Amino acid sequence: MSVAFHHKLLHASVIRERVHVPRGRVYCLAATTTKPRPDLAELAVEPRLPTAPGPLISPDRPVLNDPSLKSTWGHRAWLACGCTTVLVALAKSMVASSESHVWAEPVLAGAVGYVLADLGSGVYHWGIDNYGDASTPVFGAQIEAFQGHHKWPWTITRRQAANNLHALARAVAFVVGPIDLICNDPTMLGFVALCSGCIMFSQQFHSWAHSTKSKLPPPVVALQDLGLLVSRSQHAAHHRAPYNNNYCIVSGVWNEFLDYWKVFEALEMVLFFKFGLRPRSWSEPSSEWTEDAEEDLYQVEA
């Protein structure tokens, strides 16, 4: 058998096998990428009660709607009494000066009272900052009110009305009231009116020193710029470690002298060696003294 004949037989068998291969239908399955439009009626949103985020800091942080930061009718009544006694002293001084035609002495006495009130506010502030606690007789409420004002300085703008301003007004009412009744000297009354009035409102001046100029009345800003009231820039040094300077909060005129001669530091040494009393400013700055810069995240308007 020739090679050519053998090749023909092989080719024919292959064709025959292909002919007998069973045929079938081929189905092509194609998945479409077009998404059906959703039924808007099925996309109803279930209402959920909002959940308050957890506190990012200690829950002890005060907020502006804290009842302890608000004044009461009792506070306002004592403030009215204190203001009344101061105004009576001032009015009697002016009337007596007009009748006697003596003005220089009462005016000078008033200026001295204003300057000494700044010194008195510094001594008061230093003592409250460094000694005692809420259980301290007479000053316990004021000490408690000042606690934390280095960490949250903005609290002084509310807390002073509730705890310090009315306490000072009450003291002024008890001290100045009798003087109004028994004294008619214009010089003495001028001194008493200016000194007691500035001491009573020293906490308000302190409050203004923690406020921005945009939130203050223009006359207050003008008095701060003139140096007659302690300004925010002057008082800012008190809120930097080690928190042992710039205590005076009426005009701040005594701060440079007291800090240069370390008067309060000398008093602290005397109290420590004499009575074993350690001031809080000697401790390392802790979370209770470090100012919280994120106050705006947590202030809730009352």
Image: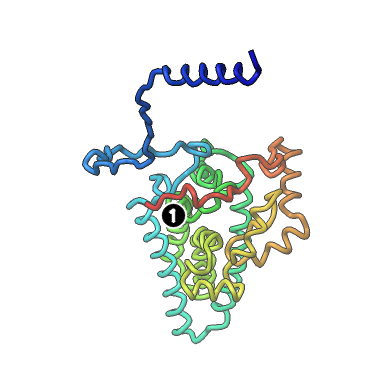
Q: Amino acid at mark 1?
A: Ala
Of residue 73 and residue 271, the one placed in the foreground of this image is 73
Pick the front one: 1 or 107: 1
| Residue beneath the point at 45% across and 84% down | 98
| The N terminus, quarter of image | top right
Badge 1, how many Cα within 10 Å: few under 14, some, many 20+? many
Report the label total. Answer: 1
- Which colour assignment does the render follow? rainbow
Residue depicted at 76% across the width and 38% down the height: 273
* Residue at far front of view: 1
The front one of 168 and 283 is 283
Q: Residue furthest top?
A: 1
Picture residue at 53% right of the left edge, 83% below the top: 103
> Residue at image x 45%, y 46%?
63
Q: Position of residue 8 (x, y in %)?
A: 57, 20
What x and y, as percent, mark residue 296?
A: 50, 52
Say whether residue 283 is left or right of residue 183.
right
Query: Residue 128: in sight, yes or no?
Result: no
Judging from the image, what secondary structure is the residue with disc 1 in? Answer: helix
| Image x and y of residue 19, in percent | 43, 20
> Is residue 100 shown left or right of residue 266?
left
Q: Residue furthest right?
A: 261
Q: Nearer the viewer, residue 143 or 66?
A: 66
- Residue 150: x %, y % from top left: 59, 48
Residue projecting furthest to the left: 41
Q: Which residue is mark 1?
A: 161
In the rendered view, would you say 11 is above or below 101? above
Horizontal side, residue 142 vs residue 257: left or right: left
